[in-house]
Image (cartoon, rainbow, N blue to C red):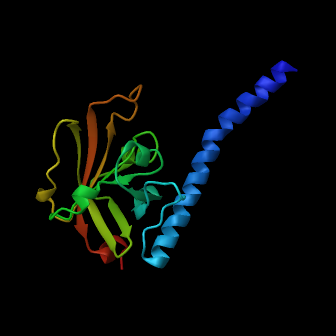
Amino acid sequence: MAIIVTGFALLLHSLWLPAKAELAQFLLSRAWTKTLETQQYTPPWPWADHYPVARLIAPSQQIEQIVLAGDSGSVLAFAPGLNMAADSSVTGAKIISAHRDTHFRFLKAVNVDDALVLRTVNELLAYRVTEINVMNETEFLYPEMNPGGLYLVTCYPFDAMGSASNQRLVVSAVPEPVRKVYNL
């Protein structure tokens, strides 16, 4: 009997994280929809210290992801995060980061000239990937070199064992007319 109870407890424990992740994505999506409807940022749950600010779309990868305000560890546990300091700077560049083994796993297959779309509360922004670089974590991005650009940043390499990595994959993209991205 003890073996059955232990087995059942282990089964429940193993299902808890995937169930929690699915619930979080549902709540994030619902908060994003409400944000668009009300034009006011809405947290996904009452005690959340983050809220959706955009939806990132990678058409060639068939990826759509909610982007949260900020890029702290607690934000990145749920979704990609927008660096709010860079977003409010005079360059207008947007820097979004996420974990390589979850939300930004798709960057492994992104290519130069791929389209990216960022839907914010107020606008639809389109970009074209121009560079894919590996940088040391101590190197700096210079968003002023790409005013209005988009940077997607994740740890590198993708298949590294463990979570420690001093390298970053940086996907740089320049603004494009939305009609060009969607062939309008």
At 51% from the left and 70% from the top, the residue drawn is 33
Left or right position of 107 against 34: left
Residue 1 visible in this rendered orientation of the protein = yes
**Percent x, y for residue 109?**
38, 47
**Residue reaching furthest bottom?**
184
Question: Which image quadrant is residue 146 in?
Answer: bottom left
**Residue reaching furthest left?**
145
Left or right position of 174 against 101: left
At 60% from the left and 40% from the top, the residue drawn is 17
As displayed, is residue 31 above or below residue 86? below
**Percent x, y for residue 78?**
48, 49
Left or right position of 184 against 168: right
Please tell me which residue lies in front, 95 or 101: 95
Question: Which image quadrant is residue 92 in?
Answer: bottom left
Question: Which image quadrant is residue 122 in?
Answer: bottom left
Please tell me which residue lies in front, 61 or 100: 100
Residue 94 visible in this rendered orientation of the protein = no
The N terminus: image quadrant = top right
**Percent x, y for residue 81?**
37, 53
Left or right position of 10 against 165: right
